[in-house]
Image (spheres, coloured by chain):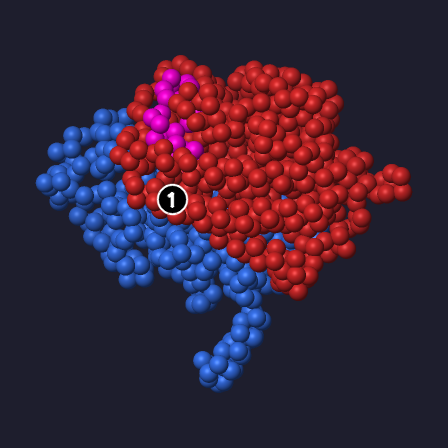
Amino acid sequence: MRIGRRDFLKLAAGAVAAGKLAPAALARLAEVLLSRDAPRVIWLQGAGCDGCAVSTLNSIHYASFDSLLLNTLDVKFQSNVMAAAGDLAVSAAQAAGAQPGYILIIEGAIPIGAAGKYCGLWPGTTMQQAVQQFSVNAGYILALGSCACFGGVVAGAPNPTDARSVGQVLGNDSRLVNVPGCPAHPDWLVGTLTYLINHGRLPPLDAHRRPLQYFGQRVHDKCFRRHKLCGQMVFAQQLGQGGCLEHVGCKGKKAYSDCPVRKWNAGGGGRYGVNWCVGAGSPCLGCCEPGFPDGMSPFYVYSARRGEEPRAPARVAGRKGRGGARRGAEKQRALAWAEQTPLPGPGGRS
Amino acid sequence: MRTTIVIDPVTRIEGHLQIEVTVDQVGGQLQVVGARSAGTMFRGFEIILIGRDPRDAVPYTQRICGVCPVPHAMAACLTLESAFGITPPDNGRILRNLVLGANFIDSHLLHFYHLSILDYVNTTGLLDQSPWIPRYTTADMVSGSAAATLISHYVTALEMRRKAHQMGAIFGGKLPCVGSFVVGGCTEQVTSEKIADFRGLLSEVRSFIDNVYLADASTLADRFPGYYQLGRGYGNLLAFGAFDLNASGSSKLFAPGRYVDGAVAPFDPAQITEYVAYSWYTAACGNKHPSQGLTEPEADKLGAYSWTKAPRYASQVYELGPLARMWVNNQYNRGISAMDRIVARAQEAKKIADAMNGWLDELVPGAPAYQPSSIPGQATGVGLTEAPRGGLGHWIQISDSVISCYQVVTPTSWNGSPRDDLGQSGPIEAALVGTPVGDVNQPVEVLRVVHSFDPCLACSVHLVRPGEAVVRARVRQPGRARRA
C-alpha cells in the first residue's frame, strides 16, 4: 500500500533517525505539507462514457493514480471511486462546493436540450445545473475529454440531446483549461493539474484553450510513418500496410497532440507508452480537435480533398515550397513545444 | 412501516443510475419489498450513427462505454463483417480476442477491488480521506487486519488493471478505445517482440489473479455467506457466446446458451424481443427484434419510468454476465446469488487469462491480420459477443452504402431493464426483493446486490426520473441521411 501524507511525515522522521534527512529539512518539509492543504477536486461526469476517468486510472508518468488520490489531491467527489452513494455522496459534493478555490473537473458533454434533463446527476439537479452551480466557487475549471471540451461524439450530428461543451455553457471563462482527447491521455490531465498546482496559474494555452505543452505539435509532424524512400513519401494504399496512412483516412495533418512521442499506456518506466493509434496501423481520428467527430469522419476515407481520388504519390512528394508562412508558424510552435516538453526524442517501440 | 429509499446517484459504477427501493417489515426483518432501477442519461448513439460510413461504427460505438470499449469494437466488427460477407484472417481474430481478453481482465479487477469491495470493508483507519470519506460503516463489514489486506490489494489491483490495459494497447494501439479493430481484422502487425511483451505482462497479471484475486473473492465469500442466499432474482441465465476459436466462430471459449427451468438450452438470437411498455419510447418501438429496432423517444408516455427498453428472450426475463457464461459452459454451478456473481467473475478472469496465454502461441509473426473489403450498397448484419457484464449485440442495416439503422442491445439493458409489457420486473429489480436492510440511512446491502451485477449505465439509454415533469424529446426519424 502507498503512503498517505501523514504516513509520509512518519517515514520522513524515520529517515532522519537513519541520517538521511537533516532535521531542518524535515521541519521545512512538514511545514510545506501542513501549511498547504492538498488541492480539492470536484469531478463531475455528464453525457460521456467515463472513458477519461478510466484513462486517468492508467496514469504513471507524473504520478500513479493511487498516489494522486492518497498524496496529491483531495478528491471530494468522483462517482467512480468514492465510497459514499446517494445523499451521502451529494452532501460531500455540496459541502466541498461551498468552499471556494477547488479545481472543477468536468468530464462528458452538457446536454441542454429538454431543459438539461437528458443527463441528471442527482435528484433535482441536471448536469447543466451542476456545472453552473459548481463553477461559481471553482478556482480552475478543467474540461476533460473531447465531449467536455468541444461536444465530442455526443454532439455528433444531428446532436440529438443538444450537447454542449463546457466553454459553450460557461462562456468565455478565464479559469477554463481544455484537455481534450477521446479519451484524454492521463498525462495530459495529470500534467495540467501539476502545472496548476505548482505554478498557481493556467499553463500556456492555444486558441482552443488547450495546453500548448501537449497540443502544440501536429500529429503528422512527429509521426514515425512520415518518412521518405528515395525522396518520395510512401503511402499505405490499404490498412495493414506500412507508410503514411493519409490515404486510408489518417487525420494526423489536421490534429494536434503529442501522441506520436508520448504514446499510450506507459509501463513501469513511465516515460513512453507501449503504442498509439497510428503505431498500431490505425489512422489518427483527430480526436483532440474541435471538429471531432463530424469534421474528421468518415474516419477511413482520405480527407485532404474529400470526394477526390488520392493524388499520385509522386505529386504528393513534390510539396516543397508550399505553405511557407504556415510552416514558419508551425515551426515556432514546434520549438516552443520542444522547449516545454521534457520528453527526449522518439524512443521505445514504434 | 413502508419506507422508500432512493439511492441517486449509485456510485462506483459506470454511468448514471438511480435505485429506488421500498422497504417494509417482513417476518420481523426490514427488507426490500419492491425495487425500481432507472438510468438518468440519454445520448442517442443509435440516432447519431444514421447516415454515417458503416466502418465508422467501430470507433463510434466504442465511445458508448469507456469501461468496455473493446466489446463494442468487437461487436461492431462482427456486425460489419457479417454485412460485408468477409472473414478476418486467423491472426486478426486472435489479436482481437487477446485485446478483448485484456479488457475483460481489467474490468473484472476494477469491479472487484475498486467498484464493489468498499461495500464490504470498513476502511476506518486505512483510508481516512476523500474520496473514501464520507462512507458507510456498519457492523457487518470486514475490519482489522483482513480489511488492511484487502485495501492493500485495492492499491495493487490498480497497478494490475493498468497492466491489463497496457497489454491491450500492445495490439490495440491504446486503451480505453482501441484503434486497431477494423472491419476485416486488426491493423496491428504481429511480431515476436510484441508477443513477448504481451506475455510478460500477462504472466504478472495471471499471477495476481491466481494468488490474490481468487483468494480475496473466496475470503469475501467465506466472510459473507449470507449473500449466497440473496440477490437471486429470476434465476434464468443467458450467454451470447464470445472469443471465437476458429474462423467460422463455431467454436468459442464461451459457447452461447441459456439456463432456464433447471436445464441448459440452446440460444436462438431470433427470440430476442425488446419491450417498451414502461420505457419512454413510442409504442412503434416495442415488441420488435433488434434487427428491426427503432429508437423513437416519447418522453410524455404515461406509466413509463426508464429510458432502457426491456429486452426479453421468448418473453422471459434473463440475467446476463460472467455467472451466465460460466454456468452455461459448465464451469460454475454453485448457485445464483449476489455472491455467486462475484465468485464466478473471479473464476472467469482466470479462465480467460489462462486461455490468452495459449492464444499467444497461435499467432504467426509476419502473417497478415487484416483482410481488405468494400462497403456493400445494401446489407444487413448482426454481431453477438460478450462484454465483461454480459452478452452484447449490434445490428446494422446498410442502404446506399451508409448506415440506415443501427441498434445496440447492451448487457445492462437486460440486467437493468424496467418492467416489460407482461409486467415482469427487470433482473436487478427482481434480485433486490427480499434483501434485508439493517439501516435505511446506510443501505449497503442494497448496494452489494446492485454492484454484484456490475451495472454499466452509459451503455443503456435513458432520460428523466420517474415522477418528474415530462419533456418532449426532439425526435429524429431513423432513415434520414445525415449528409449526402
Q: Nearer the viewer, residue A19 or A282?
A: A19
The magenta region covers: B76-100
Left of B179 or right of it: where is A247? left
Dominant secondary structure of the magenta stretch?
helix
The residue drawn where x is 65% and y is 57% is B147
Q: For the N terminus of chain A, which image quadrant?
A: bottom right
Q: Is residue A134 visible?
A: no
Task: Give the x, y percent position of residue A228.
Answer: 15, 42
Task: Give the x, y percent position of residue A218.
Answer: 29, 48
Is B187 drawn above or below residue B115 in the view shown? Answer: above
Q: Quadrant of residue A156?
A: top left
Is A36 drawn above or below residue A290 in the view shown? Answer: below
Q: Label 1: state its secondary structure.
A: helix
Task: Give the x, y percent position of residue B232.
Answer: 72, 33
Is residue B83 one of those drawn in magenta?
yes
Task: Give the x, y percent position of residue A266.
Answer: 39, 52
Left of B83 or right of it: where is B242? right
Q: Quadrant of residue B458?
A: top right
Chain that is blue in the image: A
Q: In the figure, what tint was chain B given?
A: red
The residue drawn where x is 46% and y is 83% is A19
Q: How many marks?
A: 1
Q: Is residue B126 visible?
A: yes
Q: Nearer the viewer, residue B246 or B86?
A: B246
